[in-house]
Amino acid sequence: MNDTTKKAGRVAAGSKRGVLELLGEVRRFERRLPHRPEKVWRALTDARELARWFPASVEGEREEGASLRFVFRDGEPDAEGRITECEPPRVLAYTMGAETLRWELAPIPEGTLLVFTTEVKVASAPANDNAIAMCRMAA
């Protein structure tokens, strides 16, 4: 993927591996991963895989409508959420406190295109920079 800078109120930052667009209260990150979508899906949903990169343990079923509890390892207060979309191995979305996190997986010849977006529901709260760290899954 080439780095791009978008105009009209968008700011883009990127590297050879991905691009992050800041769209007001929405952040969007794309990354090409050298793994099949099923493997990337496990990294998003399996507790042992999540422990390697996600800043919290996630308690709850991985099905649409299920309640979730996020227990952060760094001392942040726990958060509650709910799965809003779950279409293995293509789409996973859930709320986490005031944020909505959404992962879209698409097969590409070299593996998977991962599109991650985070949206803050409270207009006065800035998007959480921890969301960017969540995109740094082991490739």
Image: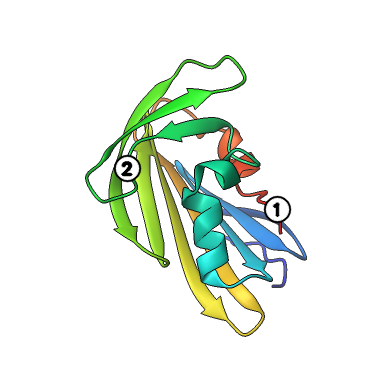
> Is 127 on the left or on the right of 97, as rendered?
right
- Please, which residue is most extreme toward the right here? 16
Tag 1: Cα neighbours inside 10 Å, few (<14), some, or many (≥20)? few
> Is 107 on the left or on the right of 5, as rendered?
left
Quadrant of the frame with the N terminus: bottom right
> Is 128 on the left or on the right of 33, as rendered?
left
Residue at the image position 45 percent from the left and 63 percent from the top: 104
Instruction: Of the two numbered discs 1 and 2 on the same chain, state the one appearing first in sequence.
Output: 2
Residue at the image position 69 percent from the left and 71 percent from the top: 34
Q: Is residue 99 above or below residue 30?
A: above
- Please, which residue is most extreme toward the bottom here? 109
Choose top left, top right, bottom left or bottom right for residue 109: bottom right
In this rendered view, identify the residue nearer to me: 10 or 83.
83
Residue at numbered disc 1: 138
Q: Residue 49 got which mark?
A: none
Choose top left, top right, bottom left or bottom right for residue 31: bottom right
Residue at numbered disc 2: 61
